[in-house]
Amino acid sequence: MPRPLWTGAISFGLVTIPIKVISASEDRAIHFHQFHLSDMGRVRTRKVCDLDGEELSQDEIGKGYEITKDETVPVTDEELDQMPLPTAKAIEIVSFVDAAGIDPVRIADSYYLASGGQVAAKPYTLLRQALERSEKVAVAKFAWHGRERLGMLQVREEAIVLHVLHWPDEIRSPESLAPKDVELDENEIEQAVQLTETMAADDISGFRDHYREALEQLIEAKSEGKATPEPAEDTERESGQVMDLMAALNASVEAAKESRGADDGDATDATVHPMRSRRKAPGKKTAARKTAAKKTAAKKTAATRSQEKRSAS
């Protein structure tokens, strides 16, 4: 396990649970440095004062809040640490809610909470089992990196996980993003649902980062002076080509089945076919009424023509 990022305690009513905060994920992406193309010299970011142009070391740099262009209020780390917050060194549980009541958009980073020694083993286990048995998650407040944050405590296997939550006013409204006045045929909706069923999976543990794997192959080939890998065949449709939505859904279902290795028998069952409209078909009585109405109209037309001929003669 990596080094703890933060140490403190979970405040659970009158129970205090010493914990250590450990990142629940790790960055596996490949990162690049910037180089001068002519001589491959490293290009670095330097911190320079705007007033005297001098390059500064980290111990010469402090925090400040710019009130106006000409006025900045300095704030020290000591002043931030001494702010009167009850959550300064504790993750204070304030309520318990159903997990479904937490909007996933509000979840930011996730961290494992490890028990802080043998003294914390029993209350840590007590909280974990209480969360499991109640099928709830705990909403908590804590101070970290100079600000108070909102979090959610949830059980994952045998550990308690802290999910950092955005405050409600930090979430933008998606109200203006949805397309307006779009009409969908019921057949299209049914076919889209069938596509989701064809592409359904029990879990996502088998997914891999193909881009990172290709990038590793590229770097390895260049470092050894070998030819770079050939680019993958472009299977995208030609630019500007418009595909019928129903045809696209059918083709998508077929492609999903082929990628899963479905046999011919299963393939027949999962094929998307045009569906009849759910509107009730006209009954026999309605059809008979229409036929009778047409005959009556024809008789009236014939009678009118006969009368016109008599008048003309």
Image (spheres, rainbow, N blue to C red):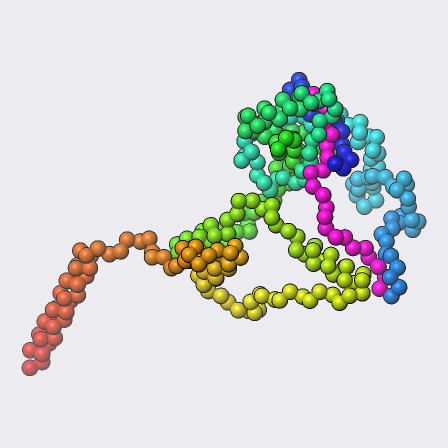
Between 97 and 3, which is closer to the camera in this rendering?
A: 3
Residue shown at 66%/55% (left/top)?
Answer: 210
Give the magenta range. 16-37
Up-down relation of residue 53 to residue 23 (above or below): below
Residue 166's x, y, as percent?
65, 38
Residue shown at 79%/39% (left/top)?
Answer: 65
Residue 296 in magenta?
no
Residue 286's quadrant in the figure?
Answer: bottom left
Residue 216's x, y, as percent?
73, 56
Quadrant (top left, top right, bottom left, bottom right) of the N terminus: top right
Residue 31 in magenta?
yes
Residue shown at 63%/39% (left/top)?
Answer: 107
Up-down relation of residue 124 to residue 236 (above or below): above
Between 73 and 5, which is closer to the camera in this rendering?
A: 5
Residue 39's x, y, as percent?
89, 64
Q: In the displayed structure, does residue 245 sit left or right of residue 7?
A: left
Q: Look at the image and tell me whether residue 191 can be seen.
A: no
